[in-house]
Image: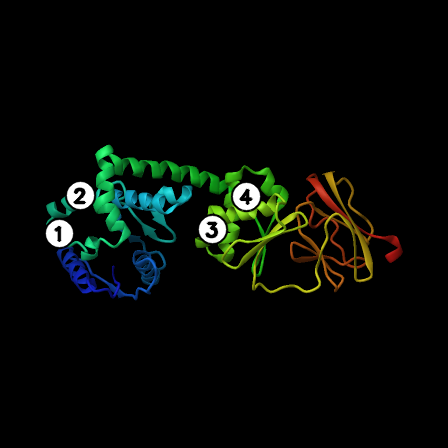
Amino acid sequence: LHVDHGLPYSPLMAEAARRVAKSLEVPLEVVSTTVPEGASPEGQARSARYRAFAEAVAGREALLTAHTEDDDAETILFNLIRGTGPQGLTGIPAFRPPNIYRPLLAVTRSETLEIATLAGLPYADDPMNQDPTLTRNLLRREVLPVLARLNPRLVPALHRMGQMLARDVEHLDRLAASIRPVTGEGWAAIPLGVLLSRPRPVADRALIDALGALAGRGVVSAERLDRIWSVVRGDAPREEVGGGVIVSRRGAMIVLRLEDAPQTEGLLVLTPGIHRFGGLELRVVSVDAPCRVAPLSKWAAVFPSDVLLEAGADGVVRANGEPAWIPGGERLPVAWYEPGSVGYLSVLVREECR
């Protein structure tokens, strides 16, 4: 499979791909794509290429790319220079879901060229690799050679570092996956207590996942994470964190919401205390102990302490956005509470209002 980017040297590279396919006696599929204009020609071309890959390779097929150890080292260095977190320093992953594999990441560029030469395969380098205005070419041709004077084994050293960091990141990601945000159309909410009880690297990843799901991972940065934490700590009531996302604290929940997300009118957040709505007066109590007895009255209900409780003008109490209880009518006294768990919210309608 060869992707024609529609760039000045694309016909030359398409012809080179045909020569290789002919030499190997394998069929060649050429897919044409268009590279949109943007601040990063390299990034735009990469995005267009992977979109073409996704359209051309489907089902049980697998696509193998020839990224090398040098490509991996250049990616790590590129991310380091522009500013990145641990994920950016892991380099190029050996597998990109759902079906792209990179089996040559432990092989250097010079070794692949030597193997191709010994195998008698025709070789052609993309002329764009000589363009000094492209950042990766500058790293490859000028920066890495200078650094290699300090450490001739720099490329494999960067590759090994990326692999070690990838294992650490994978472990932290698994821990963060246990934090499951409550989600709705254009919003996500995470219990405040959960964030504060987890190590910062784990909580950060949960926030990154929630923010990335709303606005795209490209908007997540250390500065934006700091803004979210100012709300978590109570230093600020709300913050705009980019990508059209506003973070606020609602009761025991940290809520991330897109500015243009549909709003549910007339909802009242039920935090511990006294609340009045729809002619009723509700008393909400937070108890830091297991719930031993389920309420028998249709005017009372019990919920886990980390749910987002809201009451609407329609008389329905919602738990994490889902209808859960109609005071005086249908009730789910323990449906939202797991017996034996420590911490719960008790909601009781004042007797005079019944």
Label 1: element kind: loop
Q: Earlier in the sequence, mark 4 or mark 3?
A: 4
> Badge 4 is on which residue?
178
Marks 1 and 4, how far apart at CA: 49 Å
Residue 15, quarter of picture: bottom left
Mark in front: 1 vs 3: 3
Residues at marks 4 and 3, CA–CA distance in whole angstroms: 20 Å
Crowd around label 1: few <14 · some 14–19 · many ≥20 (10 Å): some
Which amino acid, by three-letter code, is at mark 3?
Answer: Val
Residue 353 x/y as whole percent: 86, 57
State left or right for residue 51 relative to residue 271: left
Q: Going 71% across and 63% down the picture, which residue do you hit?
A: 266
Q: Residues within 10 Å of mark 3 (few under 14, many from 20)?
A: some
Q: Sequence order check: which comes first, mark 1 or mark 3?
A: 1
Report whether 76 appears left or right of 312. Answer: left
The amino acid pointed to by label 4 is: Ser
Question: In the depicted view, which residue is nearer to us: 144 or 162?
Answer: 144
